[in-house]
Image (cartoon, grey):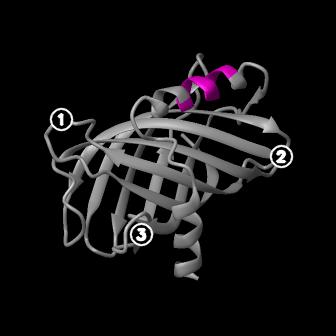
Amino acid sequence: MLTQLRQIAIRLPDPFKGSAALASLLIGLSVSSFSQPLQVEGHAFVQAGIGLYDVRRKSVSPMKQVELHFPTSFTGVQSIAGFAGSETDDSYLYAGLLHEFVLLKPILVSVSFSAGLYTRGTGIELGSPLEFRSAARAAWLWSSGFSLGIEIAHLSHAHLVESNPGLETLTILYAFPVRM
């Protein structure tokens, strides 16, 4: 199963290199103006998942991720905070912004951008403890606010130092509302 998921991930286009991350975010925000925003009044969301870490290399390993989506602000953009850890003991603690919308009921789409601290275990050396994360997710949304989906994300330090190998993750995520 891991081999099959890795083969799928390798074939995926990399929308997160260079200025494409900004383009993805702008496209998502412009498309969202024609769609219904996700709103469960007074609720935040917890998103948890399992997946593959560093999917574009032979060093692929299992990973876990948990993320908190704070209640939507008046602009429709949510604050997020999260943690991801791999079986190679690499970890990433991050915070950022997320915009999600229902493109076609019941398909929920989200784009996010975060900054955070990366700690290397026995995995890839990313070149800097400061890393940026851009992600896109598609999920099936139930009327109760629960969702199940898949996310692809890219970590990179935007060439803050010379070496910038970056890495991609592919994660299956389950999200549920919580009252704050």
Query: Circle 1: is it few (<14), some (14-19), or many (20+) Cα within 10 Å?
Result: few
Q: Disc number at residue 160?
A: 1
Where 14 sits versus 7, above or below?
above
Earlier sequence position, callout 1 versus callout 3: 3
* Residue at the outermost right position: 105
Earlier sequence position, callout 3 versus callout 2: 3
Amino acid type assigned to the residue bearing label 3 in the image: Met
Q: Is label 1 in a helix, a strand or a loop?
A: loop
- Cα distance in 3D space between marks 2 and 1: 40 Å
Residue at 47% of width from left, 33% of height from top?
21
Earlier sequence position, callout 2 versus callout 1: 2
Q: Give the magenta part as a residue range.
A: 24-30
In the rendering, at what x and y percent does residue 36 appear?
Answer: 79, 28
Amino acid type assigned to the residue bearing label 2 in the image: Pro
Asked if the magenta segment contains residue 25, the reply would be yes
- Cα distance in 3D space between marks 1 and 3: 26 Å
In the rendering, at what x and y percent does residue 2 appear?
Answer: 53, 79
In the rendering, at what x and y percent does residue 44 appear?
Answer: 57, 41
Residue at 67% of width from left, 48% of height from top?
138
Q: Which residue is mark 2?
A: 106
Amino acid type assigned to the residue bearing label 1 in the image: Leu
Q: Which residue is mark 3?
A: 63
Q: Is label 2 in a helix, a strand or a loop?
A: loop
Give 178 or 31, whichever is nearer the viewer: 31
Query: Circle 2: is it few (<14), some (14-19), or many (20+) Cα within 10 Å?
Result: few
CB within 8 Å, label 3 to label 2:
no
- Cα distance in 3D space between marks 3 and 2: 27 Å
Where the C terminus falls, by quadrant?
top right
Magenta span: chief secondary structure: helix
Residue at 25% of width from left, 71% of height from top?
89
Q: Disc number at residue 76?
A: none
Residue at 59% of width from left, 67% of height from top?
8
